[in-house]
Image: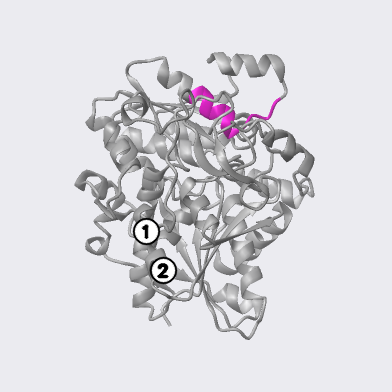
């Protein structure tokens, strides 16, 4: 039996897949927060290059990957599809478990799949500098890598709790030439306001996004970049699922269940979306999104128009949200601590195409340790959520020979401080209180 399936460079997809035209019921457009009317491309062009805005609003099913992007992709793509035989044996299950290993990228996660094209399209339009936010540091690392490839400056606002928890993420960003500050910072008006009111805040992605947007608006040479949530990001990540489909075919197998962790939605959508047309054509397949119990936007949030940030400077997106004022606890899966969910993933859940489950962080670290001991790769805390859900799925009925595919979205070699906390018993589980969510929801925009 083949342990891993690796495609040749010339078998890498040359087009991304855009799921938007295939979503039953479609997507609601982003709204201008001032007029509550659909947001114009012209207004968005203040922060995004037109090349990306065209993809954001595209109704084309396939979009060609520029050759310059393909060449950089080839540093790590196509990524391996691996059969987790040792994990199967340890679980005593007849299920077949496969994972798409996105941890092989230069920065150790799937985030580089969109960072490279985003840097490319900015460079093509003469942008000199990009401002962004990062939660766990994986996105900041990826964009730092990508901007170094295209000669751009990069400024990263890193959520304070992760800035303190993950010092080597900062080192990685510095290695690629980026400037990194803890968010909220004293460098922006919104940062200073929040620090004055909440000096001990752990920060949040919503705050960091506000700072990065303020930075981008304040300079003519700077655009803003987002590592998840938006349609063009989901588009770029589709290369994961497109490769996986080819690899599953080579394996002579097809997934009954596809699983991914959910923060903003990019890694699960990247794996799932290329399989959606099969589902719509009658193929029996389940898609499962896994989120932390401490930040349960899909399982406890509301489908509504909301801002993507605390300062209310983003367009209004129709998504599952816990409210833009939501400040999540400082769990160690920093990349999953976001109040909202990608409109695309939200629409898939709305249409009952995708299921959502929530899990606690201690059981996720247990799953990550088992995976490390069996398959030899230490997963990122975010990835541990997908592994935990995979184990639950594989052990529901040990005699069920189902095929499970999950996205190994990143390795955890720069997250060992989180594992230290787990081993020392310092981690605790959080269920975000329903009354806190209700309080945050009360401030949703009235549309």
For residue 29, above or below residue 129: below
Q: Which mark is residue 22?
A: 1
Taking the spot 28% from the left edge, 32% from the top edge, the residue there is 50
Say left or right for 296 vs 83: right
Residue 362 found in image quarter: bottom right
- The residue segment tinted magenta is 201-212
The earlier-in-sequence mark between 1 and 2 is: 1
Mark 1–mark 2 Cα distance, whole angstroms, equals 8 Å
Taking the spot 70% from the left edge, 26% from the top edge, the residue there is 201
Residue 354, percent from left and from top: 53, 61
Asked if the magenta segment contains residue 63, the reply would be: no
**Is residue 303 in sight in this rendering?**
yes
Dot 2 falls on a residue whose secondary structure is helix
CB under 8 Å between discs 1 and 2: yes
Magenta span: predominant SS is helix
10, 389: nearer the viewer: 389
Pointer 2: what residue? 280
């Amino acid at each position: 039996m083949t342990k891993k399936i690796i495609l040749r460079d010339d078998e890498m997809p040359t087009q991304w897949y855009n799921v938007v035209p295939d979503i039953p019921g479609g997507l609601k457009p982003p709204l201008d927060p001032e007029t509550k009317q659909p947001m114009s491309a012209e207004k968005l062009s203040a922060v995004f290059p037109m090349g990306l805005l065209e993809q954001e609003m595209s109704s084309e099913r396939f979009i060609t990957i520029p050759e310059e992007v393909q060449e950089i992709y080839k540093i790590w793509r196509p990524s391996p599809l691996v059969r987790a035989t040792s994990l199967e044996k340890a679980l005593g299950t007849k299920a077949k478990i496969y994972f798409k290993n996105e941890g092989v990228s230069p920065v150790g996660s799937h985030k580089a799949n969109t960072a490279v094209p985003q840097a490319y399209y900015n460079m093509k339009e003469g942008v000199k500098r990009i401002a962004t936010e990062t939660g766990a540091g994986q996105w900041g690392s990826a964009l730092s890598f990508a901007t170094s490839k295209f000669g751009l400056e990069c400024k990263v606002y890193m959520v304070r709790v992760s800035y303190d928890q993950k010092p080597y993420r900062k080192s990685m960003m510095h290695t690629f030439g980026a400037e990194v500050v803890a968010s909220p910072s004293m460098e922006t008006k919104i940062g200073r306001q929040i620090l004055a009111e909440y000096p001990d805040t752990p920060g949040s992605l919503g705050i960091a996004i506000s700072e990065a947007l303020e930075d981008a608006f304040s300079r003519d040479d700077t655009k803003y970049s987002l590592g998840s949530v938006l349609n063009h990001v989901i588009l770029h990540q589709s290369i994961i699922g497109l490769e996986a489909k080819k690899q599953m075919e080579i394996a002579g197998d097809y997934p009954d269940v596809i699983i991914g962790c959910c923060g903003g939605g990019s890694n699960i959508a990247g794996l799932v979306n290329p399989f959606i047309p099969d589902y719509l054509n009658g193929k029996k397949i389940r898609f499962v999104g896994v989120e932390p119990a401490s930040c349960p936007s899909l399982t406890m949030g509301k489908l509504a128009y909301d801002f993507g940030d605390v300062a209310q400077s983003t367009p209004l997106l129709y998504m599952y949200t816990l409210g833009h004022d939501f400040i999540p606890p400082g769990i160690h899966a920093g990349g999953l601590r976001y109040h909202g969910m990608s409109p695309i993933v939200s629409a898939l859940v709305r249409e009952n195409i995708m299921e959502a489950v929530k899990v606690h962080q201690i059981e996720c670290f247990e799953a990550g340790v088992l995976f490390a001991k069996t398959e030899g790769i230490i997963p990122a805390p975010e990835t541990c959520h997908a592994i935990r859900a995979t184990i639950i799925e594989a052990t529901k009925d040990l005699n069920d020979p189902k095929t499970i595919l999950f996205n190994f979205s990143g390795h955890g070699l720069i997250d060992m401080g989180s594992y230290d906390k787990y081993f020392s018993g310092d981690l605790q589980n959080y269920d975000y209180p329903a009354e806190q969510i209700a309080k945050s929801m009360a401030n949703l925009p009235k549309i």
